[in-house]
Image (spheres, grey):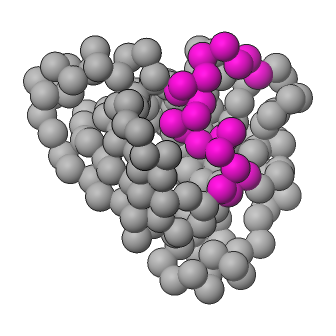
Amino acid sequence: MEIERKFLVKSLPPGLKARSGSPIRQGYFSIRDKDVEIRLREIGSKRCITIKAGRGLVRLEEEIPISRECFEALWPLVRKASIQKTRYRIPCAGHTLEVDIYQGHHRCLITAEVEFRPLREAKAFHPPVFLGREVTGNRHYTNESLARSTLRRFRKGDHGI
């Protein structure tokens, strides 16, 4: 199970520019069940297929590593429903924030996610001041929704910074 909260970022976290980020390319397969997503992801030199079920704070997640050849063979199937972003991992109050800066159609959107082990940790988490509105469970801000909404453009100050 994945326990995760997601926030818009209203200002860049201290020290972010000094860190190196990992480029991410991910796309989504078309399926009918709105509560299940199947994602193809490349992050750095790692590639996988991920299956997620459910919405909101707690979801089922299973990740299956795949080869570069398999990824490249499958990529044309998801290219039209894909996103690109750079991820920065920031230590924060005993947790790790994953700050994502989006490119392409979603340029200017910056989000941060933090994963928890027990649910009580998620509920007790107090976000740092540079995080903005919480969007956990908001379908407009899921990566799958962003990947499928190529016409939506973000402007500086709209969503994130």
Is residue 50 shown above or below 2? above
User: Could you say which is closer to the camera, residue 109 or residue 88?
Assistant: 109
Is residue 123 shown above or below 71? below
Relative placement, left or right, of 143 versus 15 is left
Give me the residue at 40% from left, 64% from top.
Answer: 60
Relative placement, left or right, of 33 versus 125 is left
Q: Is residue 142 magenta?
A: yes
Question: Is residue 96 visible from the viewing direction of this image?
Answer: no
Magenta stretch in the rendered image? 135-154
Give me the residue at 38% from left, 30% from top.
Answer: 30
| Residue 137 coordinates in the image, percent (x, y) | 66, 56
Q: Is residue 139 magenta?
A: yes
| Residue 34 coordinates in the image, percent (x, y) | 49, 46
Relative placement, left or right, of 9 versus 151 is right
Quarter of the figure with the N terminus: bottom left
Question: Is residue 35 visible from the viewing direction of this image?
Answer: yes
Quarter-of-image position of residue 79: top left
Q: Residue furthest right?
A: 157
Is residue 58 shown above or below 146? below
Give me the residue at 43% from left, 46% from top.
Answer: 33
User: Could you say which is closer to the camera, residue 91 or residue 56?
Assistant: 56
Relative placement, left or right, of 65 versus 118 is left
| Residue 86 coordinates in the image, percent (x, y) | 52, 31
Quarter of the figure with the C terminus: top right
Quarter-of-image position of residue 39: top left
Q: Residue furthest front?
A: 32
